[in-house]
Image: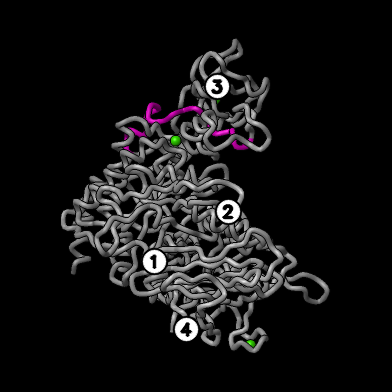
Amino acid sequence: MRRALLAAALALGAGACISPPSTGELTGQVADWRDEIIYQVLTDRFANGDRSNDYRVDLDDPSAYHGGDWRGLAERFDYLESLGVTAVWISPVVKNVEEDAGFSSYHGYWAQDFTRCNPHFGDRVGLRELVDEAHARGFKVILDIVTNHVGQAFYYDINKNGRPDDFLIGQGGTIGPLGQEQTTSELVRITEWDPDFDARGVQSWTSLGPSGEAPVRFLREPAINRMPPVPDLFAHDYAYNRKGRVTVWTRPEVCGCGGWGCPWDDACRRQQEILGDFPGGLKDLATERPDVRDALFDAYAGWIDAGDFDGFRIDTLKHVEHEFWEDFCPRIRRHAAERGKHNFFMFGEAFDGDDQLLGAYTQGEGVDSVFYFSQYYTVFRGAMLGDGSRTCELERLHCRRHGCESDPCGEGQRFDALYSGSGKVNGQVGEDGLALSPRQLPVGFLSNHDVGRFLYFMPEAWSQSEKRALLHLALGYLLSSDGIPCLYYGVEQEFAGGNDPANRETLWDKRYYKTPVWKDGRIQMAQKTYDSDGDGADDALWEPYDTGNPTFQYIAKLNALRREHEALRRGTLQVRWSTRTGGGEDHGIYAFERRSADETILVVLNLGAESTSRTASAGQSMCVGFEPRTELTDLLDPDARYTVTDSGCSPEPGQGCVEIEVAPRGIRILAAG
Ligand SMILES: [Ca+2]
Ligand SMILES: [Ca+2]
Ligand SMILES: [Ca+2]
Ligand SMILES: [Ca+2]
């Protein structure tokens, strides 16, 4: 009944696309975001539930739409429930430019109309049905939003001939403050779709020489929806920065930097990143303008009202000036709070491994949290794929977030906490009503749609079981650490695709469940199989949406542990053991405790690949926050039990000592009992 009322309200409101439905009751409040386990889907690649919206679909082309939609996602809630995730992050929902340079907008990041739905995914009523069904099942839904740019909507008419030229030879781009510009090249190839950054704005020229700022020309190609962007403000040149594409990443010399690139805080690099067009011809909005800020706020506040979302994942955070986030985020929080939606969660993507840069976005009234790229690079791409000798690097990561009195690696000074310690107005609170700090809420991940899958980075020579062991270690760390874990769809099916688009596999297509095998004297693609009864021999075929395979089952088990144990979700984290060098009996060991009011959980990892290691070194064992004589049981392996003693370390009152053995690339999650 409520859905029928809603549908009627939405239909009435269809003319003024972003006005809220008058009877649109908003729901889905979150008790405490630390309880959530996020699952990221690419809507186009997750599940196809409606063939009627399958236009321009080509399953054989990795850069085309494949047909996934909101109906398909809603039909797979059983699958997500079995996996044990609690929040779903969906692709951007707004209408896109269909195609550019032979690629399609199946990912949703090429906005054309910020007020309408992408018809490949469904309509406005279908979107609300998805969220309503999710909420009815206890799932939260996170909307992916972009404020930095629109899709390929215009070209710069550099030669002023009134048409887009793909290829010009002419004067090079320049960069630098007015009067001190450096020419980047004498003769360069220029495309009017995506010319190089020029701090003055993209310049035009004729046969007689420079001719002032290049005019911007919007296109009208309805067949591929390359139309002037909506709202109307975005159909004017002044709504854009018009400086051309960021070039400093591949050519740091344009900012006077050496071969390793410019440091993240280099002023010239930051100017390019904030004002430049995103590579691929994505046109940079003039987000410093109040009218552009208002338009973006109106659009996305409208989507909260229309879709009843529980949070935003925010794209290209570092390409928009800090002042924008200080304006946008508090307005969104207030808007959500006025509709009774407290704990509306906003986390941003700043694609960088530097905690100082990441932490900066959490200060003041900016985003609630960021993607934990520093963890991604330090732990998953660094330590876990490395030799495991220096687990103090993992402890350093923790120090950069929370602060430490001394350097765990013994090489430097104390660490200042780089993430904000104070909560935001109308921001995140725990179930107890106390404000949560961004320090408590980093969103951790093993992979996402912009990086290769974790399995992809493992050496070809490893066996499937070796690869699986490291994948499981990484998942174990992610799901037992503090913060909010985020799983990228397909990890539970052991997808192993490389960089975009190989990492955007189609979950229902059996071809993605094949693996190369050596057979009849040559490499052939064969159906993936796995050992379902644990006798060491593969006997089960891997089918789309398989819920029986060992990695699906392992993730489901970890998710269940996280849901059952408050300490794993909301507990503090204290490091108990890390190493500065390798080779000892504690080679590869990293141990930490998660502690809530009622429970303590001890997590011990061995990042080393060769030997079983223990939490002991030079006759000293590990000090833990359990009383002597406490029995500890590994929640992942109930046969593994340890007794806490009063000797071997220097325990304080309430503490004890323990030696935990962990297999190579193994993990133990231990609780009393
Ligand atoms: Ca479809
Ligand atoms: Ca031209
Ligand atoms: Ca920008
Ligand atoms: Ca078997």
- Disc 2: which residue: 377
Q: Is residue 32 left or right of residue 340?
A: right
- Single out the mark in the foreground, 3 or 2: 2
- Disc 4: which residue: 629
> Which numbered disc, 3 or 1, marks the residue that appears first in the sequence?
3
Amino acid type, callout 1 = Gly
- Single out the mark in the foreground, 2 or 1: 1
Residues packed near mark 4 inside 10 Å, few (<14), some (14 to 19) or many (20 plus): few
Give me the C-alpha separation between circle 4 and circle 1.
23 Å
Q: Is residue 514 left or right of residue 565?
A: right
Amino acid type, callout 3 = Gly
Q: Is residue 557 left or right of residue 190?
A: left
> Which numbered disc, 4 or 1, marks the residue that appears first in the sequence?
1
Give me the C-alpha separation between circle 2 and circle 1.
24 Å
> Which numbered disc, 3 or 2, marks the residue that appears first in the sequence?
3
Q: Is residue 271 left or right of residue 127?
A: right
- Single out the mark in the foreground, 3 or 4: 4
Label 1 element class: loop
- Disc 3: which residue: 176
- Single out the mark in the foreground, 4 or 1: 4
Amino acid type, callout 4 = Arg
Residues packed near mark 3 inside 10 Å, few (<14), some (14 to 19) or many (20 plus): some
Residue 69: quarter of image: bottom left
- Disc 1: which residue: 571
- Single out the mark in the foreground, 2 or 4: 4
- The percent position of residue 65, horizontal first and vertical second, equals 50, 56
Give me the C-alpha separation between circle 3 and circle 4.
68 Å
Residue nearest the observer in this picture, 458 or 664: 664
Magenta stretch: give its range. 231-250
Q: Residue at the far top: name it.
A: 208
Label 4 element class: loop
